[in-house]
Image (spheres, rainbow, N blue to C red):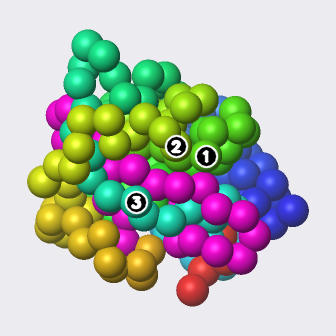
Amino acid sequence: MNLLLTTHCLIALTVTLVQSSSLEGFRNDVEMERMYRSFLEEENLSDEPGECEVKFKKVGCYKEDGEARALSEEIFNDRKNIDWKAGKWEQFLKRLACRCAKESGEKGYSHFGLQFYGECWSDPQADKRFDRYGKANGCIGFQYKKCDDEDLDNNECVGGGNKNYVYQIVGEGGGSGSGSGFGPAR
C-alpha cells in the first residue's frame, strides 16, 4: 500500500513538472535532482532499496557459453540503467537481483543468474544446468570488489561477460536478498 501511494505521488510530481511552465527554468539535472530529493524528504520517503519480497541465496560464480547457454532464457536486460557511481552501483545491484528473483520465480524457476553487469538469465532447468561449465572467478559485488560467496549480508553479486552469478530462490523465511523500489526513509 505504501509503495502504491509513493508511486502515485512520484507520478503526480512528474506530471506536475512536465505540465508546469516553470519547467523552462530548469537549466540542468542538478536542479531536478534537488527537487526530487526535496520531494522525498517532505514525503518521508527514500529511494534506497528496501527489503525484497522474494527471498534468495547466493550459489556462486559460474562460467557461461554464449552459444550453448547453461541458462538459456534472458528474462530481461537492464544494462541501459546501470549507474556506475559509488553508492548507486550497490543500489542497482540490489534492485537487479530482486527483480530477477521475482520475475524468475513468477515463471516457476528455482535459480537465476546475473550476467554482464545487468542481465537476468534463467531457465526451466536452471537448477540442473547452472554449473554446466564449472566455477568461474571474477564476479563482482559492492564497491566493485570480487564476490565473497560466504558474505550473506545482502551483498549482491553479478557476473561479467560469459559469467553468471547464480542465486537460488528460497521459501519463506530463508535466503538473502534485498533491493526493490521505494520504502520508508531510514
Question: For the residue marked with disc 1, what is the amino acid?
Answer: Ser
Residue 111 x, y percent position in the rendering: 53, 46
To which quarter of the image does residue 132 belong?
A: top left
In the rendered structure, are the residues bearing label 1 and label 2 in contact, judged by CB atoms less than 8 Å apart? yes
To which quarter of the image does residue 121 belong?
A: top left
Pick the quarter of the image with the C terminus: bottom right
Quickly name the residue at label 3.
59
Provide the secondary structure element on which disc 3 rests. Answer: strand
Frontmost residue, 169 versus 144? 169
Q: Where are the magenta residues, as a range?
A: 155-180
To which quarter of the image does residue 9 belong?
A: bottom right
Provide the secondary structure element on which disc 1 rests. Answer: loop
Vertical placement of residue 29 versus 38, above or below: above
Left or right? Give the position of 126 relative to 155.
right
Tell me the mark number nearer the camera, choosing from 2 and 3: 2
User: Can residue 86 be found in the magenta stretch?
Assistant: no
Q: Earlier in the sequence, mark 2 or mark 3?
A: 3
Provide the secondary structure element on which disc 2 rests. Answer: helix
Q: CA distance from mark 1 to mark 2?
A: 6 Å
- The structure residue drawn at horizontal position 37% and vertical position 29%, both measured from the top left corner, is 70
- The structure residue drawn at horizontal position 42% and vertical position 64%, both measured from the top left corner, is 58
Residue 64 x, y percent position in the rendering: 25, 32
The crowd level at tag 3 (other Cα within 10 Å; few <14, some 14-19, many 20+) is some
Q: CA distance from mark 2 to mark 3?
A: 11 Å
